[in-house]
Structure formats: C-alpha cells, structure tokens
Image (spheres, coloured by chain):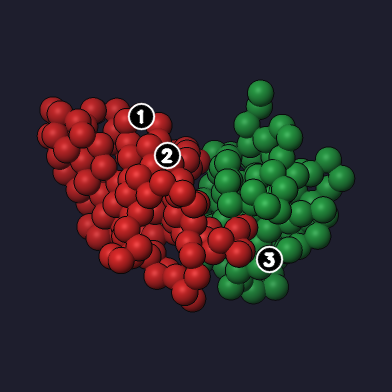
Amino acid sequence: DAGVTQSPTHLIKTRGQQVTLRCSPKSGHDTVSWYQQALGQGPQFIFQYYEEEERQRGNFPDRFSGHQFPNYSSELNVNALLLGDSALYLCASSRGRAQAYEQYFGPGTRLTVT
Amino acid sequence: AQSVTQLGSHVSVSEGALVLLRCNYSSSVPPYLFWYVQYPNQGLQLLLKYTTGATLVKGINGFEAEFKKSETSFHLTKPSAHMSDAAEYFCAVTRSSNTGKLIFGQGTTLQVKP
C-alpha cells in the first residue's frame, strides 16, 4: 500500500519565479492538506482540499494556490517566489472530512529560493 | 485561537532513561491532540493521538501521552529511551469541530546518548 508521495524531492528556484509541487495521497484518502515547514520550525498549515475545492486556508498570501484533481492528487503552486519561501513543503492526506484530523504525511519537497 | 507550546527545544537523555517531552496547548473548545516524530530528511510520522475517551493514550514504539485538561497539557513519555528514538518531535492540536487544520508546536529535538 503506497503512502503519500511527493515530487520533486528537491527544487532550486530563483526569486520571482513560479513553482509547482505535486502530491499523491495515500490509497483510499480523498483529502489533501499542505504545510510549510521552515528550517527549525514546526509545520504551518497552508490549505486543505476536499472534493476538488479549497476547504480551509491558513495565513498565507494569494501567491500560494492549489488544485485537487478527480483522482484526489493535488498541486501546490507558488508565484513570485521570495527568499522566505525556502522551506520543506509537506503534503498530508486523510480520509473524509470527519476524519480529516488523522493525517498521513509525505516525505516533503525541499524548496530553495536563491 | 489555538496554540501549542513545547517546553524545551532540545532534550538529552541517556539510553535506557525516561523520556519526557512537554507540550501545553491553548484551545477554547475541546481539542484533538497529536504527537508526531520526524527523522532527518523525512516527513512526519504519527506517534499517537487523543480525540475522546481515555486520557492516557498509547502509541507506537513504546510512547504514550496523557491528556490533562486541568493543566492543558499533553506530555509525551517513554520509560526507556533507545538510540533510534533520536529525532524531532512535534506536538499538534486541532479543534474537534474543525479537524482539518493542525497547529504545530516548534518541536523538540531528542538526543539519546549511549
């Protein structure tokens, strides 16, 4: 049973560029949440997708956007990259809204902005 | 608003000694509480969770935690530390009424000395 997968593993971008990160949820899961983990910090909630819609959003600017596909996979897009966007981006999946709290995390994508 | 405070960013114990990682939370509604572990260059793995019912919860790898409402605490313990327990540990909270957004603490690095 495959767990949560994310791609790419590492990414280096330049300030002002745009980036897309991808996530495939654990088998049987239909909800995807994204988190940003800066170095030495705990993860911070970006947003959550369920039924192809953004259901909740954390305190992140509109430069951060996402999408969920019919197969429940998800993308995180960040526009106009800033140095401060350098972080580990974690995707978590869960089953249904009632159990959205039980989240399984992927290995993350390490984004470096230069 | 909800928040989590992990007391002690670094904890060092000897192999075989008791592990105690402290977590205090703030929540105006009944919380759901979690402990996650993160090994270097990996995602987060759920150790244990409290939602309702028994306040002493047991998790994987011999860890357990006790929900104490009067103290707003959810400390993580393990009777005997093993070298493989060395990792970063995160406490997280979410509202029972809004279960998709996890709020994480800053993390505690556990060092296990031989």
In the orientation shown, which residue stands out farthest toward the right? A70
| Vertical relation: A60 (above or below) A101 | below
> CA–CA distance between discs 1 and 2?
8 Å
Amino acid type, residue under disc 1 in the picture: Asn
For residue B106, what is the image quadrant? bottom left
As drawn, the label of residue B47 is: 2
The secondary element bearing badge 3 is classed as strand
Q: Position of residue B86 (x, y in %)?
A: 28, 36
Percent x, y for residue A62?
Answer: 70, 73
The label on residue A56 is 3
* Alpha carbon separation for disc pair 1 and 3: 33 Å
Q: Chain for mark 2?
A: B
Query: Which amino acid, by three-letter code, is at mark 3?
Result: Gln
Marks 1, 3 in one chain:
no
- Rendered residue at 64%/51% (across/down): A100
Q: Nearer the viewer, mark 1 or mark 3?
A: 1
Residue A73 % position (x, y): 76, 43
Q: Is residue A66 left or right of residue B103?
A: right
Disc 1 target residue: B61
Quick check: do tags 1 and 2 share a chain? yes
Query: Which residue occupies the foreground of this view, B21 or B110?
Result: B21
